[in-house]
Amino acid sequence: MSSMNDSQARNPAGAAPNATQSGANAYLRQRVLSASPEELRMMLLEGALRFARQGAQGLRERNFEKSYQGIHQCQDILMELINALRPEVAPDLCRQLAALYTFMYRRLMEASAARDAAIVDEVIRLLEYENETWALAIGKLREERAASRSAASASPGMSIAIQG
């Protein structure tokens, strides 16, 4: 049995990646490395949506390899979202998000077993709502950061007094 190198594992046909793929991979790598934690979460949600849509399309086309790939990748991302939660920061929110992501994960398992695209569509709607909610939260966070930066720059002579 021969061992498979990393590029063969990603490209089972053994074809060398073209320049467009290499450029896209380099762009994605740079985007991930320079993203804030909230932007990384948004990227994960967008990826989960993309793969869930692929899974639903595969089920509709009766292309079960495509559906398996999409559903499995979406499940992997949901697990990553669960593992990235930080309950020490917001325990109630993390508990609710973990329950939501676990529900979606289970629904994808059911969709795969039943080969039912409608169940995947349900997960897609939940992911779209989560994605929109997260986009609003990021926008609000950016506004708050900009306001605090402008407030800090408006009072450059501010000093800290220590009382004894």
Image: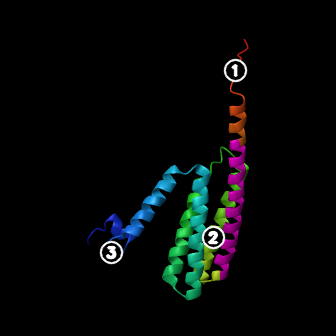
Which mark, residue 160?
1
Residue at image point 68% right, 48% down: 142
* Dot 2 amino acid type: Arg
Label 3 sits on residue: 15
- Along the viewing direction, whichever of 144 and 63 lies nearer the viewer: 144
Q: Which tag, 2 or 1, sits closer to the chain's start?
A: 2
Q: Is residue 45 left or right of residue 19?
A: right
* Dot 3 amino acid type: Ala
Choose mark 2 or mark 1, whichever is in front.
1
| Contact flag, marks 3 and 2 (Cβ < 8 Å) | no
Q: Which tag, 3 or 1, sits closer to the chain's start?
A: 3
> Between marks 3 and 2, how big is the CA–CA gap?
35 Å
> Between marks 2 and 1, how big is the CA–CA gap?
53 Å
Residue at image point 46% right, 57% down: 29
Label 2 sits on residue: 106
Choose mark 3 or mark 2, whichever is in front.
3
User: Which region shows up in magenta?
Assistant: 118-146
Residue at image point 56% right, 77% down: 54
